[in-house]
Image: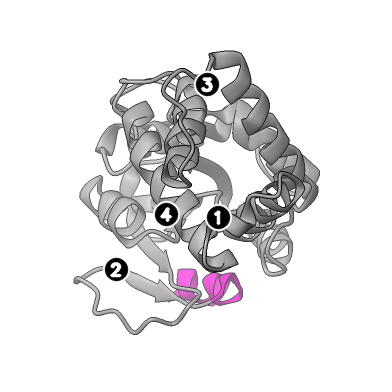
């Protein structure tokens, strides 16, 4: 069956989230004179991402609100730097995170291959988004990087409700329904092998794993590997 629709992940697929995150946390720590608390910048970035993964998983599981996981990320991160954050008020944690986001958002950028590929696919395919972040967080990124106009607003699906996050089939099937297509006629493109490729395959979509690092990781049957989005149009035809 031909592929008539394509659903995309956002962060580190279309949008360089890791690059903006790295720039943001390092700039914020320099501003606060906290980089001296870690051996090197890469250690600070790795620690920030470790705390992010822990606390964002709690948000996706419904244990924390979106704002709540941001506050917990601040508290856990600063505690790992040796600060006593047990009594840190919510307002202080929110303000600290806002300082980080100001630096991060200043570094927002799309990958260079994103806009050309979306423009090439738009005349022949229905396009949509399925993301493990709320759409009120993802829509501004897509707008700021000039990608939002490629998608109908109804085709933007985020994990706003607990229990409907990748790799669960429900969020992928919602994306297909928004495109008006059955899953076997929809490709899903994402950078996470576990959440994106395996999740999409489990929901009956055609999975394309975007392995920008060319990691040579073995993949399961039925999963197509891309090293750049520029490879996608040809891959969809074959």
**In the image, which is nearer the foreground, mark 1 or mark 3?**
1
Q: Secondary structure at mark 1?
A: helix
Circle 3 residue: 67
Q: Residue at x 24, y 68 (%)?
A: 222
Rendered location of residue 141, percent (x, y): 70, 42
Measure how far apart labels 2 and 1 are at the Cα level.
42 Å
The reply, left or right, for residue 155 in relation to residue 53 is right
Q: Residue at x 52, y 60 (%)?
A: 38
87 is higher (above) or lower (below) than 223: above
Mark 4: give few (<14), some (14-19) or many (20+) Cα within 10 Å. Answer: many
**In the image, which is nearer the foreground, mark 4 or mark 3?**
3
Measure how far apart labels 4 and 3 are at the Cα level.
29 Å
Measure how far apart labels 4 and 1 are at the Cα level.
41 Å
Q: Quadrant of the C terminus?
A: bottom left
Q: Secondary structure at mark 3?
A: helix
Q: Which mark is residue 188?
A: 4
Mark 3: give few (<14), some (14-19) or many (20+) Cα within 10 Å. Answer: some
Q: Are marks 4 and 1 in contact (CB under 8 Å)?
A: no
Measure how far apart labels 3 and 2 are at the Cα level.
35 Å
**In the image, which is nearer the foreground, mark 2 or mark 1?**
1
Q: Earlier in the sequence, mark 2 or mark 1?
A: 1
Circle 1 residue: 37
Q: Quarter-wise, where is residue 26 in the image? A: bottom right
- The tally of labels here is 4
The residue lying toward the viewer, choosing from 71 and 3, is 71
The residue lying toward the viewer, choosing from 29 and 232, is 29
Q: Which mark is residue 165?
A: none
Q: Which mark is residue 223?
A: 2
Mark 1: give few (<14), some (14-19) or many (20+) Cα within 10 Å. Answer: few
Q: Are marks 4 and 3 in contact (CB under 8 Å)?
A: no
Measure how far apart labels 1 and 3 are at the Cα level.
26 Å
């Amino acid at each position: 069956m031909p592929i008539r629709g394509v659903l995309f992940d956002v962060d580190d697929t279309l949008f360089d989230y890791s690059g903006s995150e790295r720039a943001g946390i390092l700039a914020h720590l320099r501003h606060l004179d906290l980089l001296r608390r870690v051996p090197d910048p890469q250690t600070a970035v790795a620690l920030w991402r470790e705390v992010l993964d822990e606390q964002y998983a709690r948000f996706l599981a419904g244990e924390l609100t979106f704002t709540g996981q941001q506050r917990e990320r601040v508290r856990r991160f600063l505690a790992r730097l040796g600060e006593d954050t047990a009594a840190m008020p919510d307002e202080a944690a929110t303000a600290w995170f806002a300082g980080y986001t100001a630096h991060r958002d200043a570094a927002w950028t799309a990958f260079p291959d994103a806009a050309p590929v979306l423009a090439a696919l738009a005349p022949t395919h229905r396009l949509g988004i399925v993301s493990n972040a709320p759409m009120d967080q993802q829509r501004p990124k897509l707008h700021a990087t000039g990608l939002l106009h490629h998608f109908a607003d109804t085709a933007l699906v985020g994990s706003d409700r607990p229990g409907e996050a990748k790799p669960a089939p429900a969020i992928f099937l919602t994306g297909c329904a928004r495109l008006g297509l059955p899953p076997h006629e929809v490709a899903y493109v994402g950078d996470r092998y576990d959440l994106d490729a395996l999740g999409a395959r489990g929901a009956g979509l055609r999975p394309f794993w975007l392995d920008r690092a060319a990691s040579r990781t073995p993949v399961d049957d039925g999963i197509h590997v891309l090293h750049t989005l520029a490879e996608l149009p040809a891959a969809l035809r074959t």
